[in-house]
């Protein structure tokens, strides 16, 4: 029996998390539609990302620059960062049509910095585009539960 589109989307998102945890940034960039957006809003209830403050509001060029900075070794914020582990759960199908699938899930991202573990819980929404080559990321919105509080220097992609 073939996997449902929902299960294929979950598998895709788990692969994305694995790529980020293993710092396979070039492969991560390859998951994206060129016109896609990676968003980490400051206000977890915001929907008008283009006209409000965000921790990240990345188009194609900004995603590439973010990856280049992380890979350069010149980012002060990444020097003490020892690694991340993401756990995705509670997948919920929000919408699906012939061209895309829209999901939400819970993410717990653990980071170790200077031997101190830090946790970033979030609700994450994804819009994936269905293509002849498989699924592609179109939109990723990371709504950090602690976005309104002090965030340590972030040296990774959520």
Image (tube, rainbow, N blue to C red):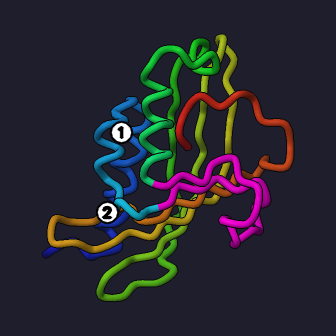
Mark 2 vs 1, N-terminal side: 1
Label 2 environment density (alpha carbons within 10 Å; few <14, some 14–19, many ≥20): many
Quarter of the picture containing the C terminus is top right
Which x, y percent locates residue 23?
Answer: 39, 30
Position of residue 150 relative to residue 74, above or below, is below
Task: Tell me which residue sits at (49%, 26%) in the image.
Answer: 70
Position of residue 81 relative to residue 156, above or below, is above
Q: Secondary structure at mark 2?
A: strand
* Residue where numbered disc 1 is placed: 19
- Circle number at residue 11: none
* Residue where numbered disc 2 is placed: 136
Task: Please state if 86 lies on the left or on the right of 142 as rendered.
Answer: left
Q: Is residue 51 magenta-colored?
A: yes
Front-most of 68 and 102? 68
Q: Residue furthest right?
A: 149
Quarter of the picture containing the N terminus is bottom left
Front-most of 95 and 70? 70
Position of residue 18 relative to residue 115, above or below, is below
Task: Tell me which residue sits at (59%, 40%) in the image.
Answer: 109
**Which region shows up in magenta?**
37-59
Task: Tell me which residue sits at (41%, 65%) in the image.
Answer: 138
Which x, y percent locates residue 71?
Answer: 42, 23
Which x, y percent locates residue 33?
Answer: 34, 61
Q: Residue 5 occupies which quadrant of the picture?
A: bottom left
Which x, y percent locates residue 143?
Answer: 67, 57
Q: Nearer the viewer, mark 2 or mark 1?
A: 2
């Amino acid at each position: 029996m073939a996997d449902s589109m929902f299960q294929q989307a979950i598998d895709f998102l788990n692969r994305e998390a694995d790529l980020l945890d293993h710092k396979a940034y070039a492969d991560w960039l390859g998951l994206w539609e060129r016109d896609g957006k990676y968003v980490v809003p400051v206000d977890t209830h915001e929907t008008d990302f283009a006209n409000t403050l965000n921790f990240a509001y990345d188009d194609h060029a900004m995603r590439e620059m973010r990856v280049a900075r992380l890979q350069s070794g010149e980012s002060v914020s990444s020097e003490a960062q020892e690694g991340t582990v993401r756990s995705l759960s509670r997948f919920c199908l929000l919408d699906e049509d012939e061209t895309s699938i829209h999901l939400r899930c819970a993410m717990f991202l653990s980071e170790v910095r200077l031997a101190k573990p830090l946790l970033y819980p979030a609700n994450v929404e994804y819009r994936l585009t269905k293509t002849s080559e498989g699924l592609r990321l179109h939109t990723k919105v990371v709504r950090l539960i602690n976005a309104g509080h002090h965030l340590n220097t972030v040296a990774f992609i959520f």
